[in-house]
């Protein structure tokens, strides 16, 4: 117990202090609601305890209960009204109920229009729920507002903007433009430092990436991420010189986009692994029944397909692709099927004119069992490959699987403006 708690003599005050301390240490502690209710019985006007109760329910995954507590508190219209609305804004945002979150965010600003952070939260929600460009511009306005009204908070505002430009899929140049001043304001931010390195790589600015990584190591020689990135960049640069390969050729194949897309997808919760985990919660029983068990880790690691998919399910029974509910009946390929196909291509390239492994990157994922495939190809995009050639379907393989999650009734973490891009033609 803290010194402050020991000095408090009023029992209700002591219980309130202890309840908050328990929440900070262990948000789901069973004593928290008992203490909070004891305070409310003694002092019904202490509605901050209701916010604590809502957070406790939320920490336990009891979202409906948390929402009800907050709605009841909003209905009281007391001194905690705006704080309760903020809690509802953030709860609905976390649950990806962006329309509801926007409603509460706008209500906060109608009551208290002068807080830069509330403006930033609204900007992020506009980007996620409505229009990306408008949301990004509003993030810039929130930073400018912070500079005018709370200059001491600028490092946080700059970092917050950079992070949310990343997870709302802003173009890399725009992210870099925002990340540079954020990193200058807080050079110790490992997240920003690493993200900037990946962004420079995405732009094929290898000299800038190298200089940035060297600067990171001067700030923190113990950084464990920078050395392997630096080695990778130097290997690429040496290989370009040795083989007289141009950066333009690398850019054509989109090789650097893979690393950037992986970083951004992991930070935004939109990666393929996230999509597959979400599918486990919503896929129909009929589909689940025809998917094979996961591949062993050592087998999945050697797959010519996607490791995350192999670790999730090692293929699917032939002829059952229609169970995905997409426009065409594509089914998952197994590790063994992909290996057999790769061996056949290598043995007789002329028999596979659209599968030139020497000139282009591809990774087989699904097949319709009739000569067409869904593959991950250049720039990390998803393509339909058939005798007629390649057709780009989605910015990534994960988009196709997220569209399946949505079709089965699951929640979608992608900004609204980017949803459904994997549905066309698949």
Image (spheres, helix red, strand yellow):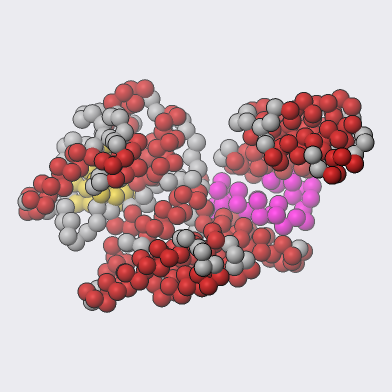
Which one is in front, 217 or 340?
217
What is the total number of numbered labels drawn onto the structure image? 0
Q: Which residue is drawn at 65% across and 51% down?
A: 121
Q: Residue at x 44, y 68 (%)?
A: 200
Q: Can residue 99 be seen in this view?
A: no
Tell me where residue 373 sits by quadrant. Answer: top left
Which one is in front, 284 or 10?
10
Residue 190's place in the image compared with 110, above or below, is below
Quadrant of the image for the N terminus?
A: top right
Q: Which residue lies furthest to the right in this view?
A: 9
Q: Which residue is drawn at 56% across and 46% down?
A: 129
- Tell me residue 40's x, y (percent): 84, 28
Quadrant of the image for the C terminus?
A: top left
- Tell me residue 94's x, y (percent): 59, 41
Residue 251's place in the image compared with 421, above or below, is below
Q: Can residue 98 be seen in this view?
A: yes
- Tell me residue 380's x, y (percent): 33, 54
Q: Is 338 positioned to the left or the right of 6 in the image? A: left
Say whether residue 116 is magenta. yes
Q: Is 37 positioned to the left or the right of 203 in the image? A: right
Q: Is 58 positioned to the left or the right of 222 in the image? A: right
The magenta span reads 105-132
Q: Looking at the magenta stretch, what is its main secondary structure? A: helix
Q: Residue at x 31, y 40 (%)?
A: 297
Say whether residue 247 is magenta. no
- Tell me residue 287's x, y (percent): 33, 26
């Amino acid at each position: 117990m803290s010194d402050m708690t020991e000095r408090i003599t009023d029992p209700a005050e002591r219980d309130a202090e202890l309840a908050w301390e328990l929440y900070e240490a262990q948000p789901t502690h069973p004593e928290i609601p008992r203490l909070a209710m004891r305070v409310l019985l003694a002092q019904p006007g202490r509605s901050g305890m209701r916010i604590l109760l809502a957070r406790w329910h939320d920490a336990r995954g009891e979202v409906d209960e948390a929402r009800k507590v907050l709605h009841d508190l909003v209905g009281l219209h007391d001194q905690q009204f705006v704080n309760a609305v903020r809690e509802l804004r953030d709860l609905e945002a976390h649950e990806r109920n962006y329309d509801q979150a926007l409603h509460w965010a706008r209500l906060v600003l109608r009551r208290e229009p002068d807080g830069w952070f509330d403006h930033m939260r609204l900007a992020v929600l506009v980007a996620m729920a409505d229009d990306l460009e408008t949301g990004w511009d509003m993030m810039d306005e929130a930073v400018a507002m912070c500079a005018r009204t709370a200059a001491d908070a600028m490092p946080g505002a700059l970092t917050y903007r950079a992070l949310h430009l990343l997870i709302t899929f802003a173009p890399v140049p725009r992210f870099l433009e925002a990340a540079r001043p954020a990193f200058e304001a807080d050079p110790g931010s490992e997240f920003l430092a690493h993200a900037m390195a990946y962004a420079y790589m995405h732009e094929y600015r290898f000299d800038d990436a190298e200089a940035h990584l060297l600067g990171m190591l001067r700030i923190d020689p113990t950084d464990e991420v920078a050395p392997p990135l630096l080695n990778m960049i130097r290997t690429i640069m040496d290989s370009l010189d040795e083989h007289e390969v141009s950066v333009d050729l690398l850019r054509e194949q989109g090789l650097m986009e893979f690393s950037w897309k992986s970083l951004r997808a992991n930070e935004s919760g939109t990666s393929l692994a996230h999509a597959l985990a979400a599918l486990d919660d919503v896929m129909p029983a009929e589909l689940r029944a025809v998917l094979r068990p996961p591949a062993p880790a050592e087998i999945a690691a050697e797959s010519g397909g996607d490791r995350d998919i192999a670790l999730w399910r090692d293929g699917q029974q032939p002829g059952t692709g229609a169970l995905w509910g997409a426009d065409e009946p594509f089914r998952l390929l197994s590790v063994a099927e992909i290996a057999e196909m790769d061996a056949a291509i290598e043995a007789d390239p002329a028999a596979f004119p659209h599968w030139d492994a020497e000139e282009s990157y591809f990774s087989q994922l699904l097949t319709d069992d009739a000569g067409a495939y869904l593959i991950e190809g250049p720039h990390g995009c998803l393509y339909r490959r058939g005798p007629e050639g390649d057709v780009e379907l989605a910015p990534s393989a994960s988009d196709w699987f997220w569209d399946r999650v949505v079709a089965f009734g699951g929640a979608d973490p992608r900004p609204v403006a980017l949803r459904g891009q994997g549905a066309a033609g698949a």
